[in-house]
Amino acid sequence: MIKHLKILEFAISSLWRRKFKNLGIIFVFSLIIFVLSSILLLTYSFKKEAIAVLEGAPELIVQRISAGRHALMPVEYMKKVEKIPGVGAVIPRLWGYYYDISTGGNYTVMAEYSGLKDLVNIMEGGFTGEKGTCIIGKGISDARFAGIGSIIPIIGADGKVRKLKTAGIFTDESRIITNDLIIVTPDDFRDIFNLPDNMVTDIVVQVYNPTEVDNVARKIKKILPDTRPITKNEILRTYDTLFDWRSGMVLTMFLGAILAFIILAWDKATGLSAEERHEIGILKAIGWETSDVMELKFWEGLVISSLSFLTGLIGGYVHIFFFGASVFSPALKGWSVIFPEFHLMPYINPYQIVVLLFMTVIPYMAATIVPSWKAAITDPDVVMRG
Amino acid sequence: MILHPGILALLGGSLIVVVMLLYSSYLGIRILRRWDINSSSEEQLSLERRTYLLSTMMSFVLAFEVLSIFLFIYTADDLHRQFVGAMCATGSLNANPAGWYVLYLGILIFFLSSLWIGINYIDQRTEGFPFVRFKYGFLLVITPVLIVKTYLQAKYFLGLNPNIITSCCGALFSGEGRGLSSSLSSLPIRPMQYIFFSVVGIFIIMALVSIKTKRTRLWYITGVMSLVVFIISIASIVSFISLYFYEIPTHHCPFDMLQGYYNYIGYPLYGSLFSGTVLAMLASTAEILKKKAPSNSNIERYQKKWTLVSVLFIIVFVSIVLYPMVFSTFTLEGY
Amino acid sequence: MEAIIRIEKASKCINRGRPNEIWPVKDVSLQILRGEVVVLKGPSGSGKTSLLSLIGCMSRPTEGRILIHGRDVAKLPERFLTDIRRRLFGFIFQQFNLIQGITVRENIMLPLYPTERSFRDMKDRAEELMESLGIIERQHFRVKGLSGGEQQRVAIARALINDPEVVLADEPTAHLDTKLSKDLIEILRKLKGEGKTIVIATHDPLVYEQDIIDRIIEMRDGRIR
């Protein structure tokens, strides 16, 4: 036991003696781990937030399709859906988009319905459902400098302005979904958009048995051929694949960088300086065994990769969660349009760490095996021949 | 599907390991054909030096395989959302026939490569390297297993189709289903508990008696017992141990306990079980080697040490199993 | 007197079967007794160093037997040779072969790193040696800044850290002036007094004409004359 500790001690002292060369390696290695961990952390927290959002979403939504486009749905459809065995409640939803000229922003306007209860929990202020009041997202509140009690003017379909009083503002944490959201009462909604009473935007269908959702969806499609049932699982799957695919894509592009680094590691380990070679010769001569020298080299590699790993990982974490992925933002335009400002909740799990280890430390350690063996088999009497 | 980060990591790593093992096998064949401990030729010296390279590579392979078993389960777990009906790793493994085989082969490779490293450890510390041929012959057995595993793993991930409807642990590990896994979970709990504790008890006693008496036959029985302990323990984890961790009388999944939600209890649980089993197997393999070794070898010392550590691991394992059974308010009375 | 080392018809060949084949040691037989001080004398290239490395278990002979305490080690794998070397021999090299960047004390303790000896134990032994060789106040200095004589003493202390039965020295005076060479002889005399067996490869008359030398073995072209 003590033997291994002593060899580790000597390995650290050896690395320290050549600190500039080794710091160079650690710097490059950390940089690669920094980039990789940033990609992984970013995509994972996106995925996690998107999924968290969807987890609260309804199991099954039915929309009407007309000429290949989403169209308003007559309320009679609800009765037909209710009759399908296994279906619980059918809840109508009203929502749409509103372009605000003064701020140049596109808002999502939604009428309050019973399924929204989860969202109401994450706001400041209170919403009683009184006509003429609304809840707004943090983004709208910031753009309009609106606090609780402020008036939000909305131009309706008839060109007249409605003045809505802000009763609540969604909290910052829920920003990813509520940033541009306005919640109004159903009556106000119909008034603003001039929507007939017998039409709704789409319907939420509750199914008693979660395993029956796909079945019910199929039946709805059969009874109402001009509708499109969307199950939550389907959306989740799409998101999942999309995010995995995105991070996988970027990682693949980085494979080149990793490969280059491994070659560098190999080169560094094979291209031992004359001084290092001489030192290994001395060690062999004074009674170090081949496996002792290999252990020395193993410890050196482990110290280098652990230091780089920690530096890179912590750097990536700080970059993503405290600096809002600032290095990446130009490359992530696609995302930044959807999510106006990053404020990701810090999140990391052992899985991401293991994946990172597999992509960086393991190839590095593998690349150093052969060179350190070559160094270790130096003849013990080589220093005598000098 | 291949662009999932976990899959990339697993496939890439496996490729490195396969290349290493292929090279090791090539060297192994050369050593098998040319090895002559009584020769002072430069070739013999160079072969002897290559054995150091081989040992290091094998240690790397073992370390990688242990990590990759967990990474594989984790990745399967991470993928479960993409399959209809999957709720955890079990569902993803069911999505493709290769899934379970990859896991089984991974465990097999863990045992084989640990045994190899143990034999290598003895060999390198015994004068004259008496087990060189045995060792490299054995290596040639491990290589194809690893290649098959890597192939199946690639096939599993490439063949995953998100539209497949799979069944999850709820269905697989439920008493009503058919097949091995559901028969495991429908095993009556009381008798299973008796069997589990008696098997473990017998194993510990056998191991201690073997250390004391040093009888060849007892060592073999201990080795076989360790395998029985392993199998019974896995069955027990599915049958009743998991229930105490989840505190749900119907949740039999062997993977969920690796999650943070259950305080990662699965890691010490499986870690102690696997280590305990493999060390006992190693001690009993050493008994076979002892016959061929010169009389001044230290094999008996290693054997004793390994068996003791193995017993310690199994005791840790049983303690982890017992803890919730004794201290938790959850009981299985009436189920 | 009991023979610690017996060499029977040992030969060492390099690049066997190739055009540049050479035999640095050819058909050598000799015995080294306990407590003896033996000099291997001969011009450079006569095979002194190669023979010394065979005696010290640093390399294996191509032919012949090497018996240490009656046990043939000629065919032992490196792992076991190293083990014997660590227990039995201490080496003093021509170039001191010290690691420049680390301290005197670390250099002296270095042979004991891959053993189970505790740090405390190693330190005590190293301090004892530095005390007796008069370099104790230099213990935390880096080797780089030391004088030739001091480096020589560090190298000797390192050779003695494992309390060897046999001390092997390869051209120990090659890089020393007369005064330092004489100091070295005095150290060797003291070691002989402690009962150590010493084998020195040298062609320096200052060494082989000393009264402490029990026997001189002359070498030429890899053979004993």
Image (cartoon, rainbow, N blue to C red):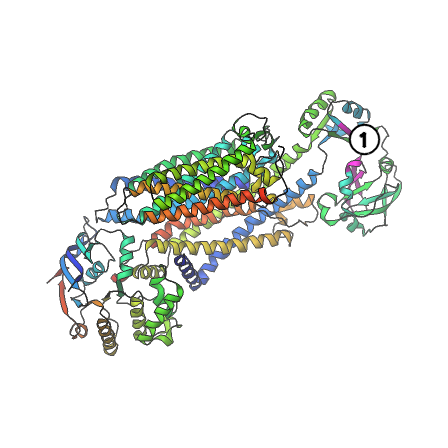
* As drawn, A99 above or below A315: above
Kindly identify which chain the residue marked by label 1 belongs to: A
Nearest the viewer among A155 and A29 is: A29
- Please report the residue visible at 68 percent of the width from the left and 33 percent of the height from the top: A232
The answer to whether A2 is drawn above or below residue B282 in the figure is: below
Residue placed under numbered mark 1 in the picture: A200
> Which region of the structure is painted magenta?
A88-115
Query: For the residue carrying disc 1, how many other residues have a C-alpha within 10 Å: few (<14), some (14-19), or many (20+)?
Result: many
Q: Can you say which quadrant of the picture contains the N terminus of chain C?
A: bottom left
Question: In screen coordinates, is B220 left or right of A153?
Answer: left
What percent of the width, then of the height, locates residue B66? 46, 43
Name the residue at the bottom extreme.
C179
SS assignment for the magenta stretch, majority: strand
Q: Is residue B59 magenta?
A: no
For the point 37% across and 46% down, which residue is it?
Answer: B211
B9 to the left or right of C181? right
Q: Residue at x 67, y 41 (%)?
A: A50
Residue A81: image location, x then y, percent: 76, 24
Q: Is residue B54 visible?
A: no
Q: Is residue B149 left or right of residue A31?
A: left
Image quadrant assignment for residue C121: bottom left
Residue B230 rendering spot, x and y as whole percentages:
46, 37
Identify which residue, B162 or B295, lies in the foreground: B295
Residue B282 sits in quarter: top left
Residue at 78% over, 29% down: A90
The percent coordinates of residue C2 (x first, y second) are: 16, 63
